[in-house]
Amino acid sequence: MELRKDYILDRWVIISKTRAMRPHQFKQDESIYANDKGPKECFFCPKNEDKTPGEIGRISEGRGWRMRWFPNKFPAVRLQGKYDITTDNKFFTYSDAYGEHQIIVETQEHDKQMTDFDEEKLVEVLKTYANRIEDMRARPHVKYVTVFKNHGKAAGTSIIHSHSQLISLNIIPLEVQTKVDAVKRLGGCPYCEIINTEKNSHRRVFENDNMVAFTPYASRFNMEVWVFPKNHHKRLDDFTDEDYLDMARCLKHILAKLKTL
């Protein structure tokens, strides 16, 4: 596995042969459940824990679990190899694909997706995200951790059972670094100003005591929504319990609307 930079642009890609080995539960032009063989053959369902890599942690429920996390069996990155960035022959800049790749299985229930979660469950998911981010970013040479969740074949989902993924990297992605640099140039916190403007605009999607969601003025994607805390927080683990609950309520509203489209 290798991290490679574009010849001249500050754009990076990960080359990983193991990703091609993933099992796929989708066939061409089929719905999300069309090729689903059910809980007995699902890697992420209870009683199939031996089909995943060794568990890192879980939230227990009775003798079982209601959420668990473990290394991705087909990782894009690994905590091994060369993490320093090297350039050969002017145009060939690279390192090993250094970092961690973890899976969070959010529910035991095979047929439930995040749109079906209640507010309490969404709070639990958000707090688990925060826990895993803080743990992964504490590793040596890690500069960035991202959480992402694919839904459906078109988004790249290979296993139907609801799950999220985390990847840590030895670089800061270009889009993130560009925004950091722009904030420094502008001074203060431009996002605080943007929030105060957009929460009163026709682009507002949802607002409660601690959160506001809106469609960005220059959206790049269909149905793109930004969600921000009203208070200035640097990290998810800075949230109070009230922040987590209001974030869950905001997500619940957005996901419910998206489900109807």
Image (tube, rainbow, N blue to C red):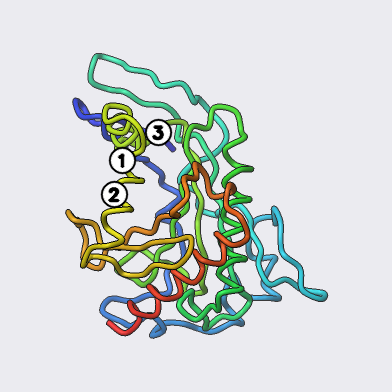
**The disc labelled 3 sits on which kind of residue?**
Ile
Residue 7's image quarter? top left
SS at circle 3: loop
Q: Position of residue 129 (x, y in %)?
A: 57, 55
**The disc labelled 2 sits on which kind of residue?**
Ile
User: In the rendered image, which residue does mark 1 sit on?
Assistant: 190
Return the mark for residue 172: 3
SS at circle 1: helix
Q: Of callouts 2 and 3, which one flags the residue occurring earlier in the amino acid sequence?
A: 3
Q: Is residue 45 above or below residue 220?
A: below
Q: Are marks 2 and 1 in contact (CB under 8 Å)?
A: yes
**The disc labelled 1 sits on which kind of residue?**
Pro
Q: Are marks 3 and 1 in contact (CB under 8 Å)?
A: no
Badge 1 density bin: few <14, some 14–19, many ≥20, Cα 10 Å: few
Q: How far is mark 3 from mark 1, CA to CA?
A: 20 Å
Badge 3 density bin: few <14, some 14–19, many ≥20, Cα 10 Å: some
Return the mark for residue 57: none
User: In the rendered image, which residue does mark 2 sit on?
Assistant: 194
Q: Nearer the viewer, mark 3 or mark 1?
A: 1
Which residue occupies 52% across, 38% down?
A: 99
Q: Are marks 2 and 3 in contact (CB under 8 Å)?
A: no
Q: Of callouts 3 and 1, which one flags the residue occurring earlier in the amino acid sequence?
A: 3
For this rendering, which residue is in front, 33 or 121? 121
Quarter of the image for the C terminus: give it. bottom left
Q: Position of residue 164 (x, y in %)?
A: 50, 61
Q: How far is mark 2 from mark 1, CA to CA?
A: 6 Å
